[in-house]
Image (cartoon, rainbow, N blue to C red):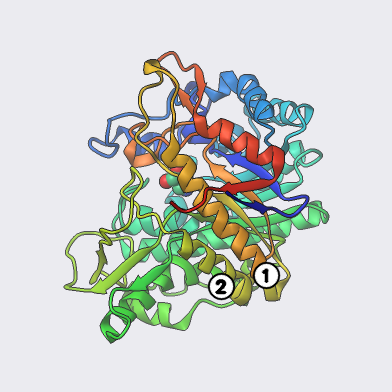
Amino acid sequence: MSLLHFPAGFRWGTATSSFQIEGAAELRGDSIWDEFCRAPGAIADGSDGRVAVDHYHRYPQDVELMASLGIDTYRFSVSWPRVSDPDGSVNAAGLGFYDALVDALCAAGIRPWLTLYHWDLPAWLPGGWTNRATADAFADYALQVHDALGDRVRVWTTLNEPWCASFLSYAGGHHAPGHTDAAEAYASAHHLLLGHGLAVRALRAADPEATLGLTLNFTPAYPADPENPADLDAVRRIDGTAHRFFTDPVFRGAYPADVIADAGAAWPADLVRDGDLELIAAPIDVLGVNYYTSQLWRAGEPSPQPTPHPSATDGVVVDRPWLSRTDMGWEITPDAFRELLVGLHRDYTGPAGVRLAITENGAAIDDPDPASGPIDDQERIDYLREHLRAVHQAIEDGAAIDTYLVWSLIDNFEWAFGYTKRFGLVAVDGDLNRVPKASAGWYAELIRTGTLSLPDPS
Ligand code: IFM
């Protein structure tokens, strides 16, 4: 057995999002995800977020559970249609829920980490993110939430995974609003980033000491044949829209020229106005990294199916049958995680003096039903252990990483997969009771000791 010690002060926690856990949909306005769930066939099991895992009513118990595990940081998101009314005014009762949640977290000694946007856009905003006005509305909403919670919440993430909220949602059609239009995807991605920039400017002015950032999802792309120019070019294009479209304007103040060239006629005229890129590049303090897997790509024939990679319709994912997979079908590739973190620190965050935080990492495992007894989710533990080993290596290699948050605290609504995928350290039974899995105990011990135990290779 070897032991890896994490730096003193390293912060450990869990993450969730509003639509995935809260329920109590009757107490808030509709989001685009409520609408999407009503579209026939959109959600694998035909489910929705109306009850979810009832966190809205059970949050005291969930906070208590986190405290019992020794969790230091809890990343949650605010439901915009719960705290705002269609005329843009504050919904006091909705905001009151988060006020009480934050109070409970602080009383339990858990640091609240608030994400303003984790995809549940108010359904009443015309055009959603394709409309530039949504970016302004987002900044107004950000300030409203900050006015109420800023005295206790010191870490603010503007957006969670804007790639998913734009390309996956407006070009791939897999997420709400389920559109398949490349021009809409580019417009949404830019307006999301603009909303981020406007919110950072507003929050910074209101609260110069707050820690501000955004969270991006990374699925590193590798060429199937590194000698084949066509494969290399497919990877360049995938990496362009999935990653560089977001990292370059935030850290370098410009969209990558090759991505705009690849977009061709799908790039909307007059999308980027004077001053937009300065706003988007407003300095941040922390980059949230969400990581689950990496992919091998080759160039094939252009696909007629909608794809979230509008400039790489010829990209084909190549299976690596020698790798294990999670229940999402995602290959388990912790080495790519280390490489990603070191590369982000070298190319983007390090030069800007920005810290990295792992804001999501975790595994969907086909756990048994909690009714059949304790859940011994060794596969999840193995996944977490290997990915934490990668984080530790990246820190040793110089990456400035200070936080690790498991996705997720609790089994929840996994978007288009409904409740068929389980990412939680804690299961939920048919009566919505919370049932910690073996991984919860394992994580609690890791937090207690700050030390990762690696079994000797057999
Ligand atoms: O459940 C999601 C989360 O909402 C965003 N990041 C990826 C997770 C697993 O798919």
Label 2 to label 1, Cα distance in Å?
10 Å
Location of residue 147 by image quarter = top right
The kind of residue tagged 2 is: Gly
Residue 169 located left or right of residue 250:
left
Mark 1, secondary structure of its residue:
loop
| Front-lying residue, 163 or 219 | 219
Residue 353 visible in the displayed image = yes
Q: Mark 2 points at which residue?
A: 343
Residue 116 drawn at (x, y percent): 61, 45
Residue 278 location in percent, x, y? 65, 73
User: For ligand 1, which image quadrant applies?
Assistant: top left
Q: Callout 2: 10 Å neighbours few (<14), some, many (20+)?
A: some
Let me know if residue 145 appears in the view.
no
Q: Which residue is drawn at 75% across and 41% down?
A: 153
Which residue is found at the position 58% from the left and 38% from the top?
87
> What is the count of numbered marks?
2
